[in-house]
Image (tube, rainbow, N blue to C red):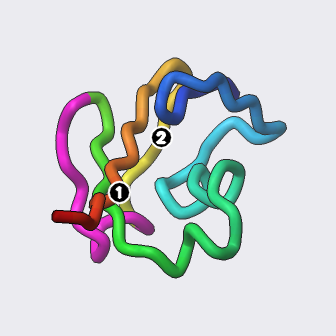
Amino acid sequence: MKFFINGQAITIATESANIIIALQHYLTPEQHQQSFAVALNGNFIGKTDYQHTDVNQGDSIDLLFPIQGG
């Protein structure tokens, strides 16, 4: 299955995945510890819904990390 995270094509060897599985193929362990927001095809997904939100062929996931500064 092929989907996109922040515009980068990700291909995995399974026919089905959820947000958690998709993020495991993209984020580093350090990034997993950071705060970020997830949008699937333009719709924000709450962290409690990651496990129950399916990612399908061709879907687009956007990850948004906060930027600190003054």
Q: Is residue 44 magenta?
A: yes
* Above-or-below relation of 35 to 11: below
Q: Nearer the viewer, residue 53 or 66?
A: 66
Q: Classify 10 Å Cα crowding around label 1: few (below 14), some (14-19), many (20 and above).
A: few
Residue at the (30%, 71%) spot, across then down: 47
Using the numbered discs, state the Cα–Cα distance from disc 1 to disc 2 in whole angstroms: 20 Å
Numbered badge on residue 44: none
Which contiguous range is marked in magenta?
42-51
Residue located 53% across and 63% down the image: 20
Residue assigned mark 2: 55
Q: Pick whichever, 13 or 23, lies toward us.
A: 23
Q: Establish if 47 lies above or below 67.
A: below
* Type of the residue with mark 1: Phe
Q: Nearer the viewer, residue 58 or 44?
A: 44
Considering the numbered disc 2 on the image, is that residue within a helix, a strand or a loop? strand
* Residue placed under numbered mark 1 in the picture: 65
